[in-house]
Structures are given as structure tokens and as C-alpha cells.
Image (cartoon, rainbow, N blue to C red):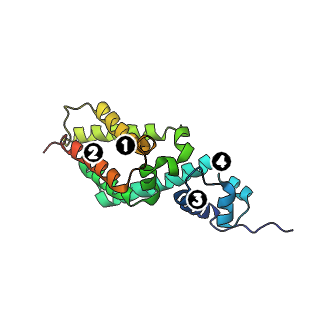
Amino acid sequence: MSPRPLLPDRRARLLAAAERLLLARGFDGLSMQRLADEVGIAKGAIYREFASKDALLGEVLSQAHARLQRRVTESLGDGLVSLSEAYRAWATTLLDEPLLCAAYTDDVGVLGAHVDRIADGRYRDRHDALEQWIRALQGEQRLSEDVDAAGLALALSAATLGLLTAAKVLGPLDRDEIAGALEALAVLTRALETP
């Protein structure tokens, strides 16, 4: 029996198929065998690309976040924008990104047990970047200096992470509820902006 031929763009195909399966079945319902069947490769070939199911989901989420960031950046253009403008752009784009929107509206079903095991520093990195951005806005006198940059960054990070895990406690949320919460954050941040 001869080995299977290499699949062109195997990694990209695995990531695309994994995203489809995550949306259809959630993380806990995604098996490496099901993914292999979907792509038409042996299960062992998946492990040549990803060390584990958690690593696979981490990469799928990283790609979704990169798409989100790219689209937000494109919509805002160059230059330092206000905090409320950025939140609005981020919210609108998030709601058009199926996997990320699904993660916010029903994290138990989509992210499953994976969300409790994220310990790679990604949330700390995003929080630190937010604090630096707030300081830059204050330096440009576009955001009130009356509010502590570190405190505001923590409040906004906690609100965003709280939205990500709210479905676990409150039950599934719908797209409109997430949109409303994100708009509320935009309105709150606008109150801190200087004219």
C-alpha cells in the first residue's frame, strides 16, 4: 500500500474545516478523526500540523482574531482614532465574523472546555496593548487624563472577557444582546473623550 499523496495547502484546509466543524459541533464535539474525514486525510497527518486539539483551536481563533484586526484596521484607516470609534468598528466587525461572534454568544457550545485552559498570555498581551493605546490617546489629549489608564484598561478588558464568558453563567446570548453590550461600551468610552 503506497502512502497517501501530500494534500496541497493541508494546514489551510485543516484550519478552514476545523472552523466549519467548530461552528457546527463546538469544540467538545470536534474530533480529530472527524476533521481528518472532512479534509480527506489520515488522522495522523493532522498531528504533523498541530500538536493537539487545543493547539488547533488556538490557531483557528488566532486566524479569526487576525482577520478581525485586519478588517477593523482597514475600516478605521491610519492614525489614532477615538476609543469609542474603535469599539464601534470592533463590534461591527466582530458580529460579522461567524466564529468569534459564536464564541461570544455561546462560549460553552463553541469553545467548550478549551476556554478554561487558555493560559498562553494572549489576554494579558491584548490588555497591555489596550493600556498602551489608552495612554497614547491621553498623550494626544483625545481621552481624559482624569481617568487612570491602567484602571480603564482593566475595566474594559474585564468587560470584554466578561462578555466572552457570560454565556456560561447567563445562558446563550444572541447577536443583538452582544451588539447592545458592545454599543454600551462605546457610549461609556465616548463620555471619557475630550472634545
**How far is the residue under mark 2 from the one under mark 1?**
9 Å
- Report whether residue 136 is seen: yes
Q: Quadrant of residue 11?
A: bottom right
At label 2, the amino acid type is Leu
Q: Which mark is residue 160?
A: 1
Residue at label 4?
52
Q: How many marks?
A: 4
Disc 1 residue crowd, few under 14, some 14–19, many 20+, Cα 10 Å: some
Q: Secondary structure at mark 2?
A: helix
Q: Earlier in the sequence, mark 1 or mark 4?
A: 4
Disc 4 residue crowd, few under 14, some 14–19, many 20+, Cα 10 Å: few
At label 3, the amino acid type is Ala
Instruction: Check the picture and name the quadrant holding the N terminus.
Output: bottom right
Q: Secondary structure at mark 1?
A: helix
Left or right: where does residue 51 sit relative to residue 135? right
Residue at label 2?
185
Instruction: Check the picture and name the quadrant holding the C terminus.
Output: top left
At label 4, the amino acid type is Ser
Q: Secondary structure at mark 4?
A: loop
Residue at label 3?
18
Q: Are marks 2 and 1 in contact (CB under 8 Å)?
A: yes
Q: Earlier in the sequence, mark 2 or mark 3?
A: 3
